[in-house]
Image (spheres, rainbow, N blue to C red):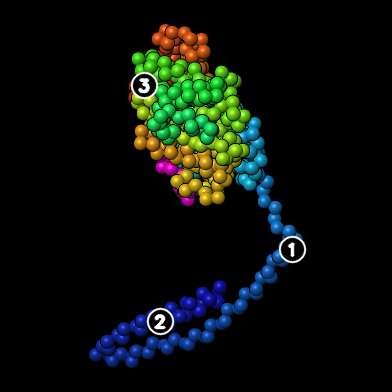
Amino acid sequence: MLILTLVLGVILVACAPAPTPVPPTAVPKAPEPTKAPVPTAAPPPTTAPVATKAPEPTKPPAPTTAPTAAPAQPLVFLSTQLTPIEEQEKMRNTILKDITGAKVEFISDAEGVVVDRILAEQKAGKVAVGAVGVLHGTFPNLLAANALEDLTPLVAKLSDRPIVKEFMTLGKLGTDKQYYIPWMQATYIMVANKKALQYLPAGANIDALTYPQLAEWGKNITAATKEKKIGFPAGPSGLMHRLTQGYLYPSYTGGLVTTYRSDDAVKMWTDFKAIWEYTNPQSVTYNNMQDPLLSEEVWVTIDHTARVVNAFKNKPNDFVGAPAPAGPKGRYYMSVLAGLGIPKGTPNRAGAEAVIEYLTRPAVQAVTLREVSFYPIVESALPTNLPDFVRLEADGVVKQSKATDAKVALLPIGLGAKGGDFNKIQQDTLTRIVLKGEDIKTVLNDQANQLNALMTELKAPCWSPDPPSTGACLAK
């Protein structure tokens, strides 16, 4: 460095401008100014010594095998969906079998149990649940309890899959943040044994049936077979209350809560009693309708697509899928949207995001449809390699959604752990009117009062098809 500094100094001097000559004076003659000394040529710079190349560090020996990836961390996936044992097994053993981002423990239980556990963990500050899969209507209560992580950053990571925009908007829960990612959807359709088609009322079209025509159809079947071949899932864990909430009430009254004791509701229950006259009395024991369809105890029913799919699977040539009947207000059907969220403070957020990323892949969505008959939330066309039984059922779903008089009703929203109490009011109404034969108007007044007490306690606003409300949604 010293040598280099000296060399640079010399170069700077050499390059400096020459001094201006001093003009000579006349008297006395000054001696000729001495010429500025020519700078001595700088010695050639000494070549900088080449740095001695540092010895290369000794490379570690190549591993004999590829480095082992960090093991997936345990993650509790708590869900209100896929509760039947068969569906739980398919979820664990088939749908989730290829996930690598987390070691998933899938637990499915009733809505009240799931909500209570999440809220209890939040309150205790000891969160164990990693991901939660519940219906759209359950999320508002979790958000109100500040129990949900903001998933907005995850949305960009999922931009490669065409999730239906309307579903993504619902996942924001009326905010500017994403609180759940759509997971899967389902609905309820009518299924009929082909043996029953010959008894359809004159001029009736199975794809455009009305509820009075369903009663007439049942009457015709009973007259011919001496058996009651219509059936409903009115057993202890059946979904009859969803048919009341999303099909019967809206189709006759255009609402549910606000119209609970209206004259239109009286007409609805009167017509349903007429249908029940030709309904298999064992319906109060049916938790799903695929078994009585296969045993032919029942020829005509309405149920959740996941709970009739085995009829199409085991006897694909015997059954047809069709839209649910229509009432005076339209052909209402319930759209069931399930979403995936992450509880606030989860111990394994990366694993939870891996679950969401995995379950929303189009290929996994197709597996979900094939295994448990929940339909994709992506806009991609249905896979062409679907089994015939899935395609048969899908025909009924498509015909229902595309019916000219089709209208959508949402699942109850904002009831949280009290969802079971809400459902019980509809079930009790059915029991008192249809099974016990009590006066319709009296029962509706009693049950509407109970409904108002519950909705006031929950401060739950109205949801479609009831009109929006500024406070609790109440029966008029």
Q: Crowdedness of circle 3 by 10 Å Cα count: few (<14), some, many (20+)?
A: many
Horizontal side of residue 141 vs 176, given as left or right: right
Q: Amino acid at mark 1?
A: Pro
Horizontal side of residue 63 vs 85, given as left or right: right
Where does the image place residue 356, in percent across and percent down from the top left? 54, 42
Disc assigned to residue 200: none
Closer to the camera, 194 or 348?
A: 194
According to the picture, the residue beneath numbered tag 1 turns out to be 61
Q: Quadrant of residue 129?
A: top right
Distance (Cα) linking label 2 and label 3: 101 Å
Residue that sits furthest to the left in the current view: 26
Compared with residue 169, is residue 240 higher up or lower down, i.e. above or below? above
**Residue drawn 52% across the image and 24% down it:** 224
Distance (Cα) linking label 2 and label 1: 56 Å
Q: Amino acid at mark 2?
A: Cys
Magenta stretch, residue numbers:
159-169
Where does the image place residue 444, in percent across and percent down from the top left? 42, 12
> What is the number of callouts on the image?
3
**Residue drawn 45% across the image and 12% down it:** 447
Q: Crowdedness of circle 1 by 10 Å Cα count: few (<14), some, many (20+)?
A: few
Disc assigned to residue 15: 2
